[in-house]
Structures are given as structure tokens and as C-alpha cells.
Image (cartoon, helix red, strand yellow):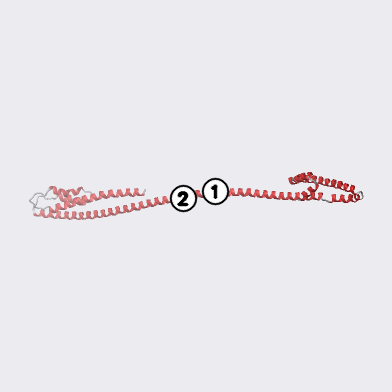
Amino acid sequence: GDQKAATKVREIEKADYDTMHADYSESIDALERAVDVLKQQDYDRKQDPESLMQVASLKGLDLIPESTKRMVDAFLQDEPEGLAVRAPEADAYEAKSGGVVKMLEDLLDKFVAERTTLEKEEMNAKHAYEMLMQDLAAQVTQATADKDEKSEAKAKAMQSKATAEGDFKDTVATRDADEAYLGDLSATCEQKASDFESRQALRAEELEAINKAIEIISGSAVKGNAETYLPSLAQRSKGRATALVSVFMGRSQRGAQARVVEYLQKRSHELSSPILLSLATRVSSDPFERVKKMIKD
């Protein structure tokens, strides 16, 4: 953009310079030739028409002022003809010729100075253009580097964002998994604690039932019946009393054993206790003494 615009301006400036420099050079060359011709002309020598054409050519140059062109034209029209001329005419011609030469020399000096100034301005313009192009090129290079740096930074930022989002999702997933695991673990612990409490309560109920069974087996009921009937039985014959005691004790033990079985079965159903049910089964089939020992154990 800026480089193309600057180049376009520079091309226009260079074209203008080339045109103007060519005009100055052409005018300077023509003036130098015209001055040389006028200085070489002698009044006593026949004028060379071709040489005077060098002077006449000044009228066709754009840079020659109109006033100069008119003076040159007047000079050429007043030129004396022939070899024989009178002294007054020669003196007038030489005076006019000297004035034209002085005017052309002044104009020549002016054009040389202006062309020199033009050349310096062109040199400065060229240098300024080159410096501008270097500056613009540096700006383009810097802008490209900045753009690349920004693009790279943007790419890194997007990558960091994607990584952060991925890490966040992983963190959330891990957190959710941990929370789910914690929830399951808490539920399991609560269930185990509840089961433990239930088992502890069941064990307590089972122990209470077993203690009750022990009371039934070795309770005061059996002992009380023995104290009631044994004295009367003792007054009878010794052999028969012994047999009756054995019969009585056997019946009492079997009744107690049956009550224990019934009680244990009832409590096993109430408590859903397989231990009490198993104990009731064994009590119903084992001898009384073994039952007492088993329950106590």
C-alpha cells in the first residue's frame, strides 16, 4: 500500500526531473553554441548563415524567455549584409552583438545554476525515497513479525485454553467419580454400621433368650417341685422312693426341656435367628444334662 504509493510518486517525480533536466541541458547546449558563434563572428568577415542558425535555434526552446527570443530575432533581422560596410554600421552591430552575448551568457549561467539545483533536488528526492522505502520495508518486516508473534501467542493461548478446559473436564470427572465413590463408600459404611448394630441387637436378644432358657432348665420350678414331693417320697420304702424320685425327676426335666424348646423356637421366629432355631433343635433331641451343658456353653 504505502510502498506502492511512494513508488508511484517517485516515478512521477523522476519523469518530471528527466523532462526538465533534458530541457535545461538542451537549452544550455544551445546557449553555449550561440555564444560561441556570436563571439567568433567578425564584422569584416562574411557571416556564415549556418552558424547564425545556432543563434536562431534559441527561439524554438521552451525555457528561453520570450524577451530573449524577441531580442535574438531583432538581432538577426538587423544583421549587416555583405563584406563592405561602413564603420558606423559596424560599430552599431558590434554593440548590439555584445549586448546579445551578455544576455545569453547571463541566461546560460542562470540555466546552469538551475540545472545544478535541479540535480541536487533530484539526488535528495532519490535519497529520501530510498530512505522511505527502507523505513516502509522495516515497518512491513516489523508488522509481519508482530503479526506472526501475535498469531503464535494466539495459538499458544488457544492451546492453553484447550488444555485448561481438558484439565477442567478431567478434574470435574475425577471429582464426580470421587464423590460417587465417597457416596457409595458412605452408604456401604452406613449399611455395615446398621448391619452391625442390628447384629449387636440380635446377639443381645439371642443372649437374653439363651439366659432365659438357662433359667428354665435350672430354674426354681424344677427345684420347687423336688422340694415339694421329695420329703413325702422319703417316708416310703427306700427302694421304691428312689425309683419314684427318678421317675419324678425325669418327668420334670422333660417338661423343662420341652418348655425350653418351645421358648427357643418362638424367639427364633420372632428374632429371625438361625442360632436360636438350631439351638432349639438340638435341645429337643439331646439328653437333659447335655442340654444344660450346651446352653451354658
Specify whether residue 266 is in view: no
Residue that appears at 37% across and 51% down: 141
Which secondary structure lies at badge 2? helix
The amino acid type found where label 1 is placed reads Asp
Residue that appears at 41% across and 50% down: 148
Residue that appears at 31% across and 52% down: 130
Q: Report x, y in % for residue 12.
A: 30, 48
Residue that appears at 67% across and 49% down: 192
Which label number is shown at residue 156?
2
Which residue is more in the foreground, 103 or 254?
Answer: 254
Q: Nearer the viewer, mark 1 or mark 2?
A: 1
Specify whether residue 97 is in view: yes
Which secondary structure lies at badge 1? helix
Which label number is shown at residue 27?
none
Question: In the picture, residue 106 is in which quadrant?
Answer: bottom left
Q: Report x, y in % for residue 290.
A: 78, 48
Query: Which residue corresponds to mark 1?
Result: 170
Relative placement, left or right, of 191 versus 45 is: right
The amino acid type found where label 2 is placed reads Lys
Relative placement, left or right, of 144 versus 86 is: right
Q: Report x, y in % for residue 276.
A: 75, 46
